[in-house]
Image (cartoon, rainbow, N blue to C red):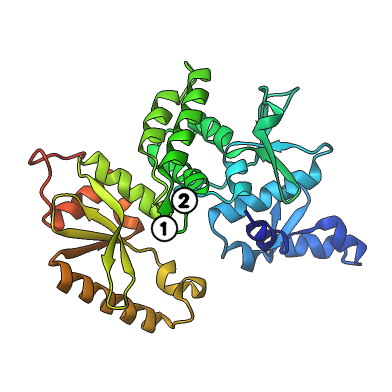
Amino acid sequence: MTPDHIDTVAQHIRTIDAYLREGVSRRDIARRLRAKTWRRVGKGGVVPTSVWDQWFPHQRHLARVIVASRETRSRPVFSHQSAAALLGSPIWQFEDAAPHIISSSAHGRTPTLVRHQFAVDECDVTEIHGFRCTAPERTLVDLSTTHTRPEQLLTFADSILARHARRERRVDREATELWRLAMEKRLRAARGQRGVRLLRSVVSFADARSDSPLESTSRWRFHEFGIAVEPQYAVPSPRGVCYFVDFHLSGRAIFGECDGRSKYLDPNLRGGLSPGEAMLEEKRREDWITATTGNRFIRWGVPEVSTPKRFGEMLHAFRIPLDPPGRRLW
């Protein structure tokens, strides 16, 4: 874990007090806030609106967490989606809202903070770049009490399982089973708590091979329609190594690839290629795989997995038979 995801956000946050010390008048600060040149974060933080508008929801939430930490007298322990944001682990369709903290004396919410009054063992608290938050496995259990959509829990579970059991493309089965056993112990301790039954299903379904929230959610959608898939399916390439396809639909001559926009638009993911070059390279890769395996490709993105209905419509459009025939979730 590196703190880059925190630093990337923190560098754009200033406080109103800092601007006042630099000689900016309160009237000018108020004018910039009214004109929406700045975006207020928490009670006293501001971020340039041009930056705020470019951030993903989890980055906006992380900004609120950073400001809340500065404005709280003690060092709070952040929990739930706030802990997930600090840990750098994804949640599908992250919702930006007030930060969550664990409080020993109060329970409730304000526009800038949500307090949860319950006990947490010190062994379940970790520190990320100076911020205290619940450890990954404890965070997953807490999230199950507030997030009722399995794909949201699964994206987080896949991510933390990968940290335990995956090294590059290799998945350690023993480490995977140890993680499941540890989670099962937590679930037994939380028996009767809201979300435990759902989380038990998610833990048993978690897979360290998932490379992104989009892949995790796609795998769950296939599961909802009774279609077994193998993630990160290896196909020999002409260069003596392997191409890895997001999904092979088990028992069917079909490969599946889920592509987000960032695959072609984010320079960090293109490996120095232009968007056009990246698309051409992907086309050559797909042509090779199709010619050598005889399998056809289907592709989808975020809109298609947003709901079971949209995903089912996609499967129908791609002429993928369901088992039993006619099975639908909409």
Quadrant of the rendered image containing residue 196: top left
Are discs 2 and 1 less than 8 Å apart at CB? yes
Residue that label 1 marks? 169
Query: What percent of the width, then of the height, locates residue 237?
Result: 28, 73
Residue that label 2 marks? 166
Q: Residue at x 62, y 37 (%)?
A: 135
Query: What percent of the width, then of the height, locates residue 308?
Result: 27, 44
Q: Amino acid at mark 1?
A: Arg
Residue 153 is at least partly visible in this image = no
Q: How many badges with numbers are in the image? A: 2
253 relative position to 308: left or right: left
Between 53 and 203, the one lying in front of the other is: 203
Are there few (<14), some (14-19), or many (20+) residues within 10 Å of tag 1?
A: few
Q: Residue at x 67, y 49 (%)?
A: 64
Regarding mark 2 in the picture, which secondary structure is present there? strand
Are there few (<14), some (14-19), or many (20+) residues within 10 Å of tag 2?
A: some
Between 212 and 301, the one lying in front of the other is: 212
Q: Amino acid at mark 2?
A: Arg
Q: Residue at x 35, y 64 (%)?
A: 259
Find residue 146 and name its label: none
Between 7 and 106, the one lying in front of the other is: 7
